Image: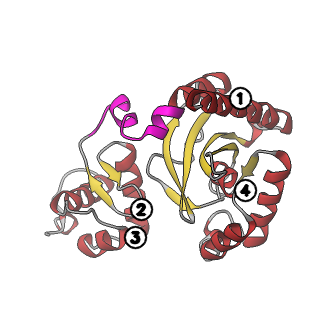
Amino acid sequence: MDNFEANQGDPGPRTLRRGLIVLRALQENPGDGMNITSLARVTGLQRPTIYRLIAALTESGFVRNIVGTKRYAACQPLSAAAEAEQDPRIQLARPAMCRLAAATGDAVFLVVRDGHESLSLWREIGGYPVQILATYAGKRQPLGVGSGGMALLARLDDATIDDIIAKNSGQLELYGGMGTHQMRQLVKNTRSRGYSVVGNYAVRGALGVGCALSDGKGQPFLAISVTAITERMPATRQREIAALIQAELKGLVDRTA
């Protein structure tokens, strides 16, 4: 495909032109979608640039992550209600997330496990003027670097946790300098408290509280987390928010029983 950036006379900001390059590449290669490596090869853009552009395009509804893969595809923007109907976990958890966002004033996230990664499915934004939008629908990261992912990780058996940490060890330092020792300590703390508290790793100046819900076989099914600026998250409020999340998760169990 011809490169938009080669033409210095192109109107519009550079970032917009790059975003259009990525979007057009996805539109011209529908099939099973494209991963970041393929997009870099086709567009000539660097991988970090593509990650940022994909994040913005996904959040805006122009691109979607193909569930269960690391590939992306172009899509038509969907209304919130229509998108929620596509995944039963979103449909199940969204009313609870809306209540939590209203009660806390902060951003609320729905996260699930996909192998050794966490996958964000949905978020609701609270009314407080400063929101920490730590993640977005379709974002993947090593399981445990965020509070929702840590809540899920701590529910797994020790052997599975060891395997996941080993697989992610090469990426952890990209998240605020986290290492395997810190990850194991967070797992221990989460199990002790009954909820996760993760701060200043995935997003500097942010702290999240997360709780997980297990299925009938004892496997973590989904997690809900609340994230805010660190100043809004003293230990007493962390406990209060964890209790709110746990009450909502119990309501989800009652609804599906």
Q: Quick one: label 1 or label 3, which is nearer the N terminus?
A: 3
Question: Which residue type carries mark 2?
Answer: Tyr
Measure the C-alpha gap from mark 4 to mark 2: 28 Å
Per the rendering, the mark at residue 158 is: none
Measure the C-alpha gap from mark 1 to mark 4: 19 Å
For label 3, the SS is: helix
Residue 90 highlighted magenta (yes or no): yes
Residue under numbered circle 3: 47
Whether the residues at callouts 1 and 4 have beta carbons within 8 Å, the answer is no
Residue under numbered circle 4: 154
Q: Residues within 10 Å of mark 4 (few under 14, many from 20)?
A: many
Q: Identify the magenta region.
A: 77-93
Q: Residue at x 79, y 70 (%)?
A: 181
Measure the C-alpha gap from mark 3 to mark 4: 31 Å
Q: Residue at x 62, y 45 (%)?
A: 216
Marks 2, 1: nearer the viewer: 1
> Which quarter of the rendered picture does the C terminus lie within?
top right
- Quick one: 221 or 187, which is closer to the camera? 221
